Image: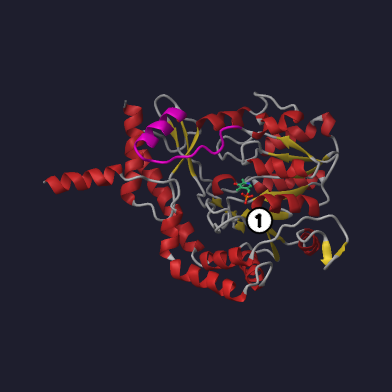
Amino acid sequence: METKTSEHAAITSEKIPAVNLKAQYDSIRAEIDAAMRSVLERQAFILGPEVAELEKAVAAKHQCAHAIGCASGSDALLLSLMALGIGEDDHVIAPPFTFFATGGSIARTGAKPVFADIDPRTFNLSPAAVERSLESPKLKGRVKAIMPVHLYGQCADMDELLAIAKRHGLAIVEDAAQAILAHYKGRPAGSVGNTGCFSFFPTKNLGGFGDGGMITTNDGMLAQRLRVLRVHGAAKKYIHSVLGLNSRLDNLQAAILLAKIKHLDEWTRSKREKAATYRQALLRSGLCQPDAVYPSQRYPVALPYAAPDRDHVYHQFTLRVLRRDELALHLKEKGIETTVYYPVPLHVQEAFAYLGGKAGDCPESERSAAEALSIPVFAEITDQQQTRVVDEIKAFYAS
Ligand SMILES: *Cc1c(COP(=O)(O)O)cnc(C)c1O
């Protein structure tokens, strides 16, 4: 009896992290160690055969003719904009409810980000809001591109955005940093716009042991320009035709990512299963309704919407909840790590104050910033851990 009680105590007090990179490493340690050792033995570290092989693998998975490795997802965005010739006096439309790099990359080129609000159901850029921005008289003819974000691993409304882009002659740079293997109506993320930008930041669905990124494209000219831009604009060594930057993917990272990408389908399938488990458990808990966009007093939790015509890869499983910060604190006290992506939308970030954005400009983004809470989802999370997460959410609203 006594052992049973203490075992039970051990289980309930066990910490549940937001992600568990150690568990993933443990599951394929031999493959990763061998891949790293082979690079170390060769002592060749920059843009080698592993990078080329990873580029091929990502291009194939995303049905793109080209993939270009670079130093980070942020650089993938910056390089894409540079390759498209976007710079000073240009404007690029992006959602404000995203990681800073989305807006930061635009501003880094000298162009101005124009923040258009999101669709509250998907958390992604609203095509209607993009249209409204394009109608603004002071932006007439000055917008050059749209940068939709496939937030949390679900693609934005690409058909609608493509139609707008076509009508106005705009490029589309997909911020697919969270969306490796995601699909939109059967088309892989990153194959729909002019370029797709991926991140291999350690906690992304395909994460390295440091920074890394990749750009996908079906445009041969853009691909060529991107390959030149990532090596300081040198098509030939020491001969610089344009101003580029140093943004390369390491062989060591590529070798690690090549070992991991073999498991990515399986990990993604597993994440989708975990998401389905959360959905069922949360619906059973009586905390939410199947189709509500917003939480309410009666139903304090709203499930993430998964559009039937796209494959969500659940980089995050993100709820909208009432009393978000209090719930996060309650879960933390119970050893459950949650994350708020993102607490401050870009249009009200200090770094973008010069753009003149203010609270109220993008109400759906602001509301999401106050309600969004990502709960632990990773391939190795157990049923028991997921049950505990849902039970603790229920306990919080019952109190
Ligand atoms: C992670 C991320 C980036 C940036 O990627 P890094 O590799 O960290 O530079 C850009 N956009 C979004 C939406 C991201 O989640």
Q: Amino acid at mark 1?
A: Gly
User: 101 or 165: which is nearer to us?
Assistant: 101
| Magenta-highlighted residues | 325-344
Residue at 76% over, 29% down: 354
What color scheme is it? secondary structure
Query: What is the tally of numbered marks visible in this picture?
Result: 1
* Quarter of the view holding residue 363: top right
Query: Residue 264 versus residue 343: which sits nearer the camera?
Result: 343
Residue 57 drawn in magenta: no
Question: Looking at the image, can residue 232 be seen?
Answer: yes
Seen from this angle, which residue lies furthest left? 1
Instruction: Report if residue 322 is visible in the image.
Output: no
Check the picture and name the quadrant holding the C terminus. top left
User: Dot 1, crowdedness within 10 Å: few (<14), some or many (≥20)?
Assistant: many
Residue bearing mark 1: 190
Element type where label 1 sits in the image = loop
Q: Residue at x 68, y 30 (%)?
A: 350
- Name the residue: 83% across, 66% down: 235
Question: Where does the image place residue 25, in percent across and percent down from the top left?
Answer: 45, 61
Q: Is residue 297 left or right of residue 113?
A: left
Judge from the rendering whether residue 176 lies leftward or rightward of residue 270; answer left or right. right
